[in-house]
Image (tube, rainbow, N blue to C red):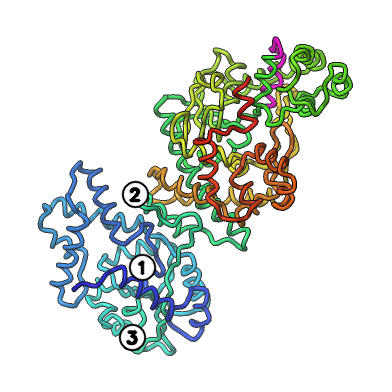
Amino acid sequence: MGIDLSFKNRVKRAGRFILGTSPEKLGRILEKADTVSFDLFDSLVRRDVPYPDSVHQLVAEKFFARTGKRIPDYSLKRKQAEAAAYAHAGGREMTLREIFGEMRSVEPESRALLMKLEQETEWEVCCADPKMKEVFDQMKRAGKHVLITSDMYLPEPLIHKILDHCGYCGYENLYLSSSFGVTKASGQLYQQLTKHNKSRPGKIIHIGDNIKSDYLRARQAGIGSSLLRGQTNPLKFHTGERNETFAAACCRAFLANHKPVGRNGRDQMAAAIGYEVLGPLLVGYCRWLKAQAKRTGISKIFFLSREGRLLKNAYEELYPYREETTAYLYVSRQALQVPMLSRCRNFHDLCGLLKPLMREHTLKSIGESCHLGGAYEKKLPALGLKLEDDLFRIPEAAQEPYFHLIQELGIHYFAEQFALAKAYLSQEGFFGSIILSDIGWHGTMQWALEKYCQDEARLQGCYIGCWNPAAAQLYERLSRSGYLTSPGKNKETELLLRFSCDIMETLFSNSEGSVAAYGRKEDKIIPVLREKEWNGSSLEFVRRVQGYAMDFVKDWNRSPLYSQADMPEELVLAGLRRMLQNPSLCTVNCFKKCRFLDGTLRNMLPNHSAVWYILHPEILISDFEKSSCKLFFLKDVFKIPLPWFWLLKFVRETLKIKSSNQKIWLEQ
């Protein structure tokens, strides 16, 4: 009766945990040795695939891409050929050529190509284990004799090439079972090692991850040995999904092998969010954006400030030799929509422009956003209005007088800014067919830009996500699409992003303030920027997150195997869901001091404790409705791990309960 492999693997892991040592502690053990021998695979070198035989699946796909032929059950055939070669070898190590010689159901020409593709793929998937690379380099600096000893059927020239690719150099000898014809598992390869190094004084210690081959057999051969515990899953937001595709599993292996550790608790969280969540999202979006540019034939991409800066950096990193031109455009809802008030004809037009500009539509916030000055506050009482009044609750009799007050105080500023904004767009070459790249959501900036350009520009919005607000008439005619969600598509992803807007926008925000207006400097139009809403530890945390995200983009682009591959959307969504759907308190606390500007400056997360809110329920409701990161809000207030996403989805989709902001969209 066969042994259950999952049980066998669990026993092996338990043995490595009991007997093994972590790479961090190896330095002290190896101080006693004069000669250090390293195992190769799963010790010095890892593969960017979930399992060693995953290489065979990649080879089958490459073979199909080259020849157009599918080999049914190739992975099984390859495994059976290896077993047959092992049986015929009679205890000695087999070679790759002998393995493919046993694959008699495949014609010789195809076997030769498959063997070539396997060697090519093995080189592509291999990467250095960073912790073991540090140990290896430490031994070289200490003047130790460094050897590499491995049971492997691959040819020796390929192993040297893999080691060079992974940055391992300066080792004195390579003891490879396929070259010597004997194995570590039998103990005979260790005999060759001791024979060749017997003239050297001092102790030899071998390091590896296999209990039998690396630990027990080395000791039986009179060589000291140290067992590696093996790699634990370093990923916080990826643990493997049910029914995970092969492509997603490969990308998850890549993440686990390359993810930086982080210096401390907060930096480790930045590494997790940046490398595991934001990095794959950037790669996936940029690959999709490239495909959109090719599909539409549009050769101009404008990345919109401020979130577009990171998108532009990632795109240019992935495509340094691109055909399309890329540019960064300084725009904001305030800089574009406030000047458009000069084109308003009545109170209804005024409401239509101000509605998407801010979340709180108090007359005070409108006065500040429109730069109306002190006269505005003085003249409001004559209309029977106060600064605290809501624009959409102004009595009908005061609506047109209020509109005329806005025009009276601001018309010259509005007209001047409209002309400057239009001149800025012309100066930046904003005409012809253009792709707009931004984080997205409704498409307000695209709508405003179309108003400025009229027939001079044809805009295609390509966003991370976009959806219609409660009343969609303003946006339905826009030509736009989203990578993760578009109007009417991927509703669950749309809800996840809706409940986490502020978090997403913070992750993409750069260190500049938003565009408040436009001005002149010599003969150029320049953006006038606000001060950054937040700084200090919060800004530093977001910078670290973005730094780790760009590290992922660079690592992915350097990979011989993955640089031309699409990022599986399921992996991107898996990371986002684990971070956003039920955030940990540790994740929430990292964003605690962030602030957000949408008409008024507000804290992104709650201002009070659960006890305070229970005593002031009306303020809890008000703050919750205003929040654009509701999942983090609930977690921060109540702490307990309830399924907040599903509760909010039920309230919104089943009970049809709307927030006050949504009601404004529906009513106007």
Query: Quick one: 249 or 201, which is closer to the camera?
Result: 249
Magenta stretch, overall SS: helix
Query: Which of the two discs, 1 and 2, labels the residue nearer the N terminus?
Result: 1
Q: Quadrant of residue 102?
A: bottom left
Residue 194: mark in rendering: 3
Look at mark 2 in the image and give the residue it sits on.
245
Q: In the rendered view, would you say 566 is above or below 560?
A: above
Return the x and y of residue 407 as percentages of the image width and height.
Answer: 78, 14
Look at mark 1 in the image and give the residue it sits on.
41
Q: CA distance from mark 2 to mark 3?
A: 45 Å
Residue type indicated by callout 1: Phe
Q: In the rendered view, would you say 178 is above or below 325?
A: below
Left or right: residue 545 compared with residue 23: right
Residue type indicated by callout 2: Thr
Residue 345 is one of the magenta-drawn residues: yes
Nearest-to-viewer mark from 2 and 3: 2
Q: Quadrant of residue 423?
A: top right
Left or right: residue 374 compared with residue 664: right
Query: Quick one: 86 or 275, which is closer to the camera?
Result: 275
Query: Quick one: 508 or 298, which is closer to the camera?
Result: 508
Return the x and y of residue 470 as percentages of the image width and height.
Answer: 56, 26
Q: CA distance from mark 3 to mark 1?
A: 21 Å
**Residue found at the very far top of the displayed protein:** 345
User: Range of the magenta residues?
Assistant: 334-347
Q: Is residue 550 visible from the viewing direction of this image?
A: no
Nearest-to-viewer mark from 1 and 2: 2
Return the x and y of residue 147 as percentages of the image width and height.
Answer: 39, 76
Q: Quadrant of residue 17?
A: bottom left
